[in-house]
Image (cartoon, rainbow, N blue to C red):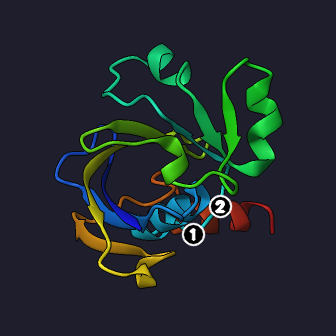
Amino acid sequence: MKIYRFRVSIFGITKLYRIIEAAADCTFEDLHDAIFEAFDRYDPHLYSFFITRADAKSMPVIMDAPVITHPANVEGEKEFGSAVEAADETTIADAGLEEKDIFHYWFDFGDDWWHRIRVEKITEAASKSKAGHLEIVKAVGESPPQYPDFDDEDFDDFDDEYD
């Protein structure tokens, strides 16, 4: 069983990343769940992985790559003519990733949390006990708030205005 070590960072934020290990039999939905947890998210949204294999500097290049997406988004992506797979049915091994490959992850299509994921290392697990292995190995930097503009005081003011 192969184990993939990913370095996940958020576009535009330096000195912030997570190292996540995932067994080859984990799905991209499993990887999404690990990223969601690793960056302290609490409100679920649609997401997609774009298998670019290299660091893309433009959105058209990223958006034209094969897509692995939230199961509820598969039909929507097919309308754009993309090669689309459902995240809950596609394993890490299915993507054919190699060491140093880079791909991209888009979480929350409204707030646009874009991530860069680099395959740091692929190793062979010593035993089959690593099947389904998924672990956040390292966290560097503090997670940004999921909704950075949200302020409890603003919400209190809104409540007061409509009481």
Disc 2 marks a residue whose amino acid type is: Pro
Q: Residue 68 carries which label?
A: none
Residue 97 or residue 76, whichever sits in front: 97
Residue 121 as seen in the image, left or right of residue 83: left
As displayed, is residue 115 above or below residue 44? above
Q: What element carries label 2?
A: loop
- Local crowd at mark 2 within 10 Å, few (<14), some, or many (≥20)? few
Residue 109 shows in this picture: no
Q: Which mark is residue 42?
A: 1
Q: Residues under labels 2 and 1: Cα distance? A: 6 Å
Residue 65 position within the rendered picture, expressed as x and y whole percent measured from the top left: 52, 24
Residue 64 or residue 60, whichever sits in front: 64
The quarter of the image holding the N terminus is bottom left
Residue 112 as seen in the image, left or right of residue 119: right
Farthest left residue in view: 15
Residue 27 position within the rendered picture, expressed as x and y whole percent measured from the top left: 58, 59
The quarter of the image holding the C terminus is bottom right
Identity of the residue drawn at 56% across and 65% down: 30
Residue 102 as seen in the image, left or right of residue 88: left
Disc 1 marks a residue whose amino acid type is: Tyr
Identity of the residue drawn at 51% across and 42% down: 95
Q: Is mark 1 on a helix, strand or loop?
A: loop
Residue 93 position within the rendered picture, expressed as x and y whole percent measured from the top left: 49, 52
As displayed, is residue 23 above or below residue 81? below
Residue 41 shows in this picture: yes
Identity of the residue drawn at 43% across and 61% down: 145
Residue under circle 2? 44
Identity of the residue drawn at 73% across and 17% down: 81
Residue 23 quadrant:
bottom left
Residue 130 quadrant:
bottom left
